[in-house]
Image: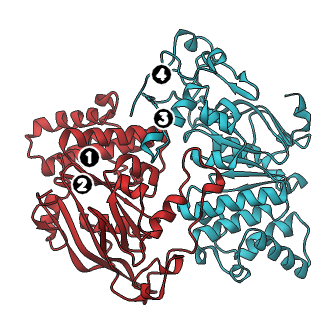
Amino acid sequence: MPEAALSLLDVRSLTKRFPVRGTTYKLHAVDDVTFTIAAGESVGLVGESGCGKSTLARLIARLLDPTDGRVFFEGQDIGQIPAARFATTPARARIQMVFQDPADSLNPRFTAFDAIAEPLHRLGRLHERAALRRRVEEVAELVGLPHALLGRYPHQLSGGQQQRVGIGRAVALAPLLLVLDEPTSALDVSVQAVILHLLAELRRQLGLAYLFVSHDLNVVRMITERVLVMYLGKIVEAGPSEVIFDRPAHPYTRALVSAVPVADRAGRRQRIAVTGEPQSAVDPSPHVCRFFGRCPDGFARCEQQMPVLAPVAPDHEAACHLSANTAESPCSSSMAAGPI
Amino acid sequence: MTQPPLLAVADLSIEFRTREGIVSALDGVSLSVRRGETVGLVGESGSGKSVTALALMGILHPAARVTSGRAVFGGLDLLAASEQQRQDYRGRALSMIFQSPRTALNPIRSIGQQIADVLRRHANLPHAKIKARALELLARVQIPDVERRFDAYPFELSGGMCQRVMIALAIACAPALLIADEPTTGLDVTTQRSILDLLDDLRRTTQMAMILITHDLGLAAERCDRIVVMHAGHVVESAATSSLFTAPRHPYTARLIASTPRPGAKLADLVPIPGTVPDLRGALTACRYRARCERAVAVCDEPPLPRTETDVGHLVACRRPL
């Protein structure tokens, strides 16, 4: 992208390998990942569990140190700052994180007030009591948490209220980027709907950018403009949300999209069968497509040469030997699809 | 239709004694399951879906007390059964799979041994045949390389594989009814699909009936013949899947459908349900959805909660149905 210099977040060849205990092997959790997020943009990150999406989120939120690659945020290479020290840098206030289970991620000994006040106190240098209270109450209003609940501990709040606190403490310092790791998957649908509306409203009001990690494709489509699809540590497809869900180019994305349950029988898609177990993420071959073996379209070349992300349409990239030229005809001949 | 249902639950009420008072977890729950049928049990957390399942299995928490009701399964009232009778039907005629397979399986026993245990207790097979049958079951649930996996421990398998082992355990004795409590929650959509396809396939080939407990309406719609909607310990609506989705009669069902993200839907289409599930301690209004309901009128407070058949097989517990 030519305007990469203007991006809020610019991630280049980001890699994280975890040592496998007792061996010299490495688990390739995030492997050579490159993408950008513009200011105010909402980007989704989807993929199955174990694909590395949470690790990627934690690398960007600077809770984990990368093995290799760079993370530019507002032009500064924050990937170089050790995660342990990042909490005391000014950039910490500008990248915040919302976690999956608010009951687990909130300090049980902190009231809702304390949880929201803590970052203001530590990073916002807001020490004066009255000013702190004013700002906490402002944040509570922003996230729709009644003032009366500020004195409560997490166990005295409902799941939805807890997540409002979790979001409140994340937006208290007016960050530019919010990394949301499955923020609604522990909630009931009725509460999820409320929180999703809140997140959309906050973004409109505060101009936040989101990296929204989720396995729920229907939710991702609602809340993002662009989507990254991850499979075994690699981004296999990236593009506008509508395009990714309506005209997926990568066989894995097609399988993922077609597996979403649909209530309306007439609206069901052709199902794409994915069989077999995924490859191991421990020292995978650099020459074999990660999806090979489960891919309904795999052929000889996929085993000899790892496909890289290549444009299939404007703003739309896929890492597949087949999609490079068949992007506009999603039903390639060899696809193992059948009616439901 | 004249054939008696496989399972008939009538007027089931369950209370929990807690330090903060008595919680009315289920109140007058009735539902039935026919042979070979898949019935979905849907609702938000705290609606009583799992308590219903645990009561049928006879594995309720000691603080729970059944205050009324019957659950007739194959001529036996499950709620009145002795522990001896329960041990005899559980795992044989009636079995259950749980949400988190990794915690539900025994972590220090190989998966093959765990299946053999069930067969030894119920299957009446000669000792020499047990291992062969266990291997057959593992193959049946599409576990690759069964000879090697027989000796594997749960931690060596992926979540999807563990769920397959749970299914193998549950179907070891060809049960007439399988209760699946959120069998795919926490699994990926692709794995979810293959697990549910497997259950559907087993159901078709063995005429097994299934109660599918889920909070995912899309999934229930895709997999169930009929759906029972629960809210705060009440069954608020039950109907054939297509009529429930095309013409929901209970305001809660309609709201639940509207708050579920559908493929291709916009955020604006997603309408939250006002209010929260009521506190189930102390005095409750006849209709427990009343405080959240935009159609509520004074008469909604008056007991009893009506249970009206608005159409053939379509039951709704509401004074002012849609």
Q: Is residue B98 visible?
A: no
In this rendering, is residue A8 above or below A336? below
Q: Amino acid under label 3?
A: Arg
Q: Amino acid under label 1?
A: Leu
x and y, in percent, of residue B52 in the image: 31, 67
Which residue is tagged 3? A269
Residue B39 occupies quadrant:
bottom left
How far is disc 1 from disc 3 in space, using C-alphas? 32 Å
Front residue of B135 and A303: A303
Discs 2 and 3 lie in a common subunit: no
Which residue is tagged 4? A296
How far is disc 2 from disc 4 in space, using C-alphas? 35 Å
Discs 1 and 3 lie in a common subunit: no
Which residue is tagged 2? B95
Point out which mark residue A311 bears.
none
Q: Amino acid under label 2?
A: Ser
Q: Secondary structure at mark 2?
A: strand
x and y, in percent, of residue A63 in the image: 74, 49
Q: Secondary structure at mark 1?
A: helix
Q: How many other residues sit within 10 Å of disc 3, few (<14), some (14-19) or many (≥20)?
A: some
Discs 2 and 4 lie in a common subunit: no
x and y, in percent, of residue A153 in the image: 65, 77
Q: Nearer the viewer, mark 1 or mark 2?
A: 2
Front residue of A121 and A301: A301
**Position of residue B9 in the picture relative to residue A62 (left or right):** left
**Numbered disc 2: what chain?**
B
Q: Nearer the viewer, mark 2 or mark 3?
A: 3
Discs 4 and 1 lie in a common subunit: no
**Numbered disc 4: what chain?**
A
How far is disc 2 from disc 3 in space, using C-alphas? 33 Å
